[in-house]
Image (cartoon, rainbow, N blue to C red):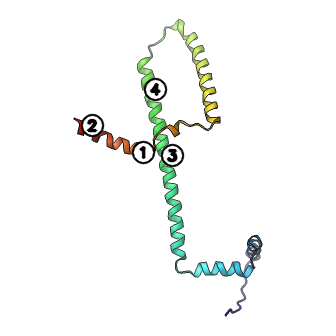
Amino acid sequence: MRDRLNVSLPVAMISQIGDLAARRKVTRSAVVEAAVASLLSPDSAEKTEAALTRRLDRLTRQMQRQERDLMIALETHALFIRFWLGQMPPLPAEAQAAANALGQERFARFLDTLGRRLSQGKSFRDDIPLDIPAMRQTAPEKEASSS
């Protein structure tokens, strides 16, 4: 059995209800009934909390991946700089101009290679295993057990 209820809503809300009803090809009453049923449902809060929890979990995983990628980039950069500084002898003043020209040429080739790789969708990140922190934690254990 159904009972009639008259409510007063803002014009903008009635317009939104009408638009949603038209998109879903249902009556405005069906849209309002579903909204009220959702609000009155005892597990509505639980559903909302579960949805928020899933979203927060997804955002947490994304942040962890970004943090991991940033850590890899920083470590790679630091290792390269440390290696380069340790391996490159200082140049005499007369060789600096030639070295600068060669450096500019190499950098241009590097940018070309980088551009090609990015346009193909390839990424250095794809070559790195996802569980690097786990690998670091088990590495000392392996070394300790092999000693």
Q: Is residue 26 left or right of residue 51?
A: right
Pick out the residue farthest to the top. 94
Q: Nearer the viewer, residue 18 or 118?
A: 118
Picture coordinates of residue 134 (x, y %)? Answer: 37, 45
**Dot 1 amino acid type:** Asp
For discs 3 and 1, the disc positioned in front in the rendered view: 1
Residues at circles 2 and 4 in contact by the CB criterion of under 8 Å: no
Quadrant in the picture for residue 17: bottom right
Say what amino acid the circle numbered 4 marks: Ile
* Mark 3 or mark 2, earlier in chain: 3
Q: Which mark is residue 131?
A: 1
Residue topped by disc 3 = 66
Instruction: Give how far apart the Cα atoms at labels 3 and 2 are.
Output: 29 Å
What's the distance in space between the residues labelled 3 and 4, CA to CA?
22 Å
Mark positioned earlier in the residue sequence (3 or 4):
3
Residue at x 46% of width, y 27% of height: 80
Tell me the crowding category of disc 1: few under 14, some 14 to 19, or many 20 or more residues within 10 angstroms, Cα based: few
**86, above or below 66, in the image:** above
User: Does the residue at mark 3 contact the one at mark 4 (Cβ under 8 Å)?
Assistant: no
Which quadrant, please, contains the C terminus? Answer: top left
Q: Which mark is residue 143?
A: 2
- Mark 1 / mark 4, whichever is N-terminal: 4
Front-lying residue, 4 or 131:
131
Q: Which residue is mark 4?
A: 81
